[in-house]
Image: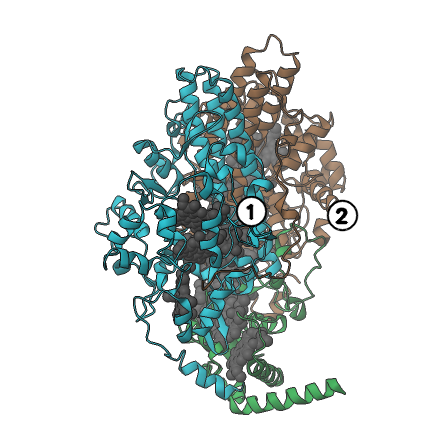
Chain colours: A green, B brown, C cyan
Amino acid sequence: MLAAAVIGAALGLGAYTFIYAKGASYLSTDPAVCANCHIMGEHFAAWQRSSHRAVAGCADCHMPHDLIGKYAAKASNGFWHSVAFTTGRFPDPLLIKPHNRAIVERACRDCHEAVTAAIDAGEGPPPRVRAGAGGTPTGNRPQLHDGLGATGEEFSCTFCHTYVGHWVR
Amino acid sequence: TTVFERKQEARNPFYRVVELTDTISDPEVWGKNFPLQYDAYLKTVDQVYTRYGGSEAVPRTPTAVDPRAVVAESRLEEDPRLRELWAGYAFAQDFREERGHAYMLDDQVFTERQRVAQQPGTCLHCHASMYVPYMRAGGGDLIKGFETLNPMPYAEARKLVSHPVACIDCHDPETMELRVTRPGFLEGIRALKASQNVGDYDVNRDATRQEMRTYVCGQCHVEYYFKGTEKRLTYPWERGLLVDSIFAYYESNGHKDWTHARSGAPVLKAQHPEFEMYNQGIHARSGVACADCHMPYERVGALKISDHHVRSPLLNISQACQTCHKLSEDEIRQRVYTIQDRTFEMRNIAIDAVLDLVRGLEQRRADSAAPAVRTAQRYQRAAQFFTDFVEAENSMGFHADQEAVRILGNAVNYARLGQAALRGEPVPAEPLAAADASAHRPRPRGERPERPGALGGEGGGTR
Amino acid sequence: TTVFERKQEARNPFYRVVELTDTISDPEVWGKNFPLQYDAYLKTVDQVYTRYGGSEAVPRTPTAVDPRAVVAESRLEEDPRLRELWAGYAFAQDFREERGHAYMLDDQVFTERQRVAQQPGTCLHCHASMYVPYMRAGGGDLIKGFETLNPMPYAEARKLVSHPVACIDCHDPETMELRVTRPGFLEGIRALKASQNVGDYDVNRDATRQEMRTYVCGQCHVEYYFKGTEKRLTYPWERGLLVDSIFAYYESNGHKDWTHARSGAPVLKAQHPEFEMYNQGIHARSGVACADCHMPYERVGALKISDHHVRSPLLNISQACQTCHKLSEDEIRQRVYTIQDRTFEMRNIAIDAVLDLVRGLEQRRADSAAPAVRTAQRYQRAAQFFTDFVEAENSMGFHADQEAVRILGNAVNYARLGQAALRGEPVPAEPLAAADASAHRPRPRGERPERPGALGGEGGGTR
Ligand SMILES: [Ca+2]
Ligand SMILES: [Ca+2]
């Protein structure tokens, strides 16, 4: 019951923001609107200086390239980001979440499959489960494989190409 | 998935010209299917040097015993102290800067180290394409083949091999996936994992793709020794990869590589522990693999492929480093040199320290039975192994910069304690105990509970 | 709050409540205009410890001479060897872990080091808000005020100050821009730049904003000494910031901090060389400033402000590190501890080495005139300073991980050579020459021409 109340509140709140803060902009593909939220500002600025500014907007990397998935993700991200933004409860600096990283990884391949055909199996069986971890190489950068399992990518484009979208360092 | 299945998703970049099987060693045949990788692979004959790496092409007049017209520079001539450091061991005879993979077989066959000592077939494990020869000799059983070749006289075993490391040593001919084909690594990594409580580790089954991009190199770029009369190639990883763990391992089984000609101490020689050192570094910790730097992706036409011209990344900074480090080539090179120069400074200090101890021991050869002298010899063994661990590692500290200097600092300290022992001063009997044997050990700060809640003092902020 | 309010907030960062002038030291007044920064500034009273940093709140019963109810842990109790290391110097009496800025004035006033030795007004330079007091005493001339306070007895000068470091010490009251107000740094950095052939350097005119984010800290977190009878505060940077350069500087002017009570050697004590060490590290090289890690930007509502709760970044990893390192907090903490544990190990080894030499010298106090003993004393001086340079630096090696261990490795070597000197063995007269005095100096590899064109050898790639 209490839970229900909270959710209800969240919904109301979220919905309010969603409209007011042009949360609907999530349904658009104009980068400027992502920047609507000042906290996205530095990414927008960095993106404008990035190698992709002319070729890929926020949505091209952060939204699934198939229609249904696209709107699902937009709605969900748009809604939750709106909630988070309004309540002010979100990590600073921002860290991409596994499922969103997986979306980005997928996006890279959609555009670059031809280039990477030789080195990347694209979608395939889930990556080998790593035994042991410990001091083993990839063991210490968990997020390197976060979300990859989800899409079955064997390895991460952004592990090496972290700079492509917007390097905020 | 395989390179060929990738066809379905995208234009298949490779034309299957020949049918590759598990018995084809000759890279030229593989090259028919993968000409880009093969062409790069052939480039490992190039000799270009950097401040501490690469190699210098030194012309020589071929002789009957050694037909090589070009060799790499002699490290012994570069630093004559090494002859003293390794007095009585084959390395004091001939030790050169290493060069590209194309030379691995010839350089092993013709090094003078072959003439001053009887070498076993084991040597070939890391200097030739061994997969097919091992399988043949073992009648389809890799390990059996390995065990058959190890004890053979080198010259005899040599007849069974025909190429330097080749495609088949790192790749599965059908899927082109990476694979480990070296018994030494298969057994070594399994022992290491066991020490981390990971049972029955099968690298070809359990490793991630990114790990394989390092493990294929770890097949050879590691410290090793020949165990027992069977001369079984063994990687001393049972207790871990740290130099301290490896030395502890050798202490436990009492192994010695040779008896030092001047001090009479039973000593050890470390050899190319790239894999071990790399694992202590920030790149390994960050998931960066050997191949990321030494075989970086390069764009060839419409494709990106792995640069099979394995070499010093400093000869290829843009591909090897700049994707991750958005800095000028010059700045990147300078960062590496800064690390290497510091390591080189400590390396030189450490070698001097060990040699001082050696000279001290030499003067006491007469009473080498005296407990003080025996203890001092143990310290030489430690100091020498620690020094060698960095000297023999080929990145001059880059793979693990702070660790390399920590090791050398310990080496100098072991030398210092060895000299104290010679003076009859009390020192820990076990060199490895020295680091913890401080007279006044401070309360290990680490043992304070982590981060208790904040506590406001009386302050004075605005007084 | 609603998005609407946040959008408002974003437009006007602060309200000008009071008019700030160049004579207002009291941070509370500044706080009226900048409540967020002021509130954080007050938080420096918190005491939280990490493995090697932060500070532990140790309750004590206030006394007439020392009214403090809480102090930081004693480093002397933690590691009694330090008493021996500093025998005969005030630090052997009382030396504690440092804590937040709020305590700087009280801790300086009440340390027992004040009772065992007569301290000059110079001390205040880094322990109080000095801008206004200096300007007053100098009649509007900062340097003159500095020169007036330095020679005063501490107690007398103390009466002229009233706050720990405050807003005015780092900020211009009108523009709020950063500014350096400390004569010690103004003169030190100018001497340093001069050594780099940059004439007439005026930090407040010539430094970039990012540099200022480090220089304001460099005002105090540096090695220093009191020059001459005027007790002029001096930063020994004339030859550079490397420990080697600083030691060379002290060798050139023969300065000593005290005579070691047990060895009789004229020795030096390094103090908090954070700025010097940081400058040898990868972060300085990458343009990362002190403030980036110790005063990271934090989001307060819609504003990004600098966290004025200056403290250990390990107590605030997400803001301090994750902006640049997209790793888990735990992984980041582990990386720091790995670096610090290695440094701590070498630090302990180095202290033991120095003390061994001290004991050797103690036994020879009688013939302290003997050349061998004199030389050994010079080596103690070097070994001790190098050890202290890392021991006194407060990041336990993090600020420059490889450099810290290089310094300690050299310290152990100096101790070793000092012991050799005592034995009458030949050693370089100048400790600083030791690193280059190797019996067999290898041909410096660096001097090989860089990257000549590739040269194909005879290969063997496909044989
Ligand atoms: Ca080489
Ligand atoms: Ca502290």
Farthest residue, direction left = C200
Question: Dot 2 corresponds to which residue?
Answer: B197
Above or below, comparing residue C16 to residue C337 in the picture? below
Question: Dot 1 corresponds to which residue?
Answer: C340
Of discs 2 and 1, which sits in the foreground? 1
Which residue is more in the foreground, C84 or B317?
C84
Above or below, comparing residue B432 to residue B462 in the picture? above
> Do circles 2 and 1 both sit on a common chain?
no
**Rendered location of residue B42, percent (x, y):** 49, 45
Which residue is more in the foreground, C417 or B199?
C417
Mark 1 nearby-residue class (10 Å; few <14, some 14–19, many ≥20) = many
The reply, left or right, for residue B358 in relation to residue A12 is: left
User: Marks 2 and 1, how far apart in space?
Assistant: 27 Å
Which quarter of the rendering shows the N terminus of chain C? Answer: bottom right
Which residue is more in the foreground, C256 or C140?
C140
Look at 27% across and 59% down and name the residue there: C136
Q: Amino acid at mark 1?
A: Gln
Q: Secondary structure at mark 1?
A: helix
Above or below, comparing residue A143 to residue C182 in the picture? below
Farthest residue, direction right = B200
Tag 2–tag 1 contact (CB < 8 Å): no
**Rendered location of residue C186, percent (x, y):** 29, 52
Q: Is residue C459 something one can see in this rendering?
A: no
Look at 39% across and 66% down and name the residue there: C26
Question: Disc 2 sits on a residue from what chain?
Answer: B
Q: Secondary structure at mark 2?
A: loop
**Rendered location of residue B34, percent (x, y):** 55, 55
Question: Disc 1 sits on a residue from what chain?
Answer: C
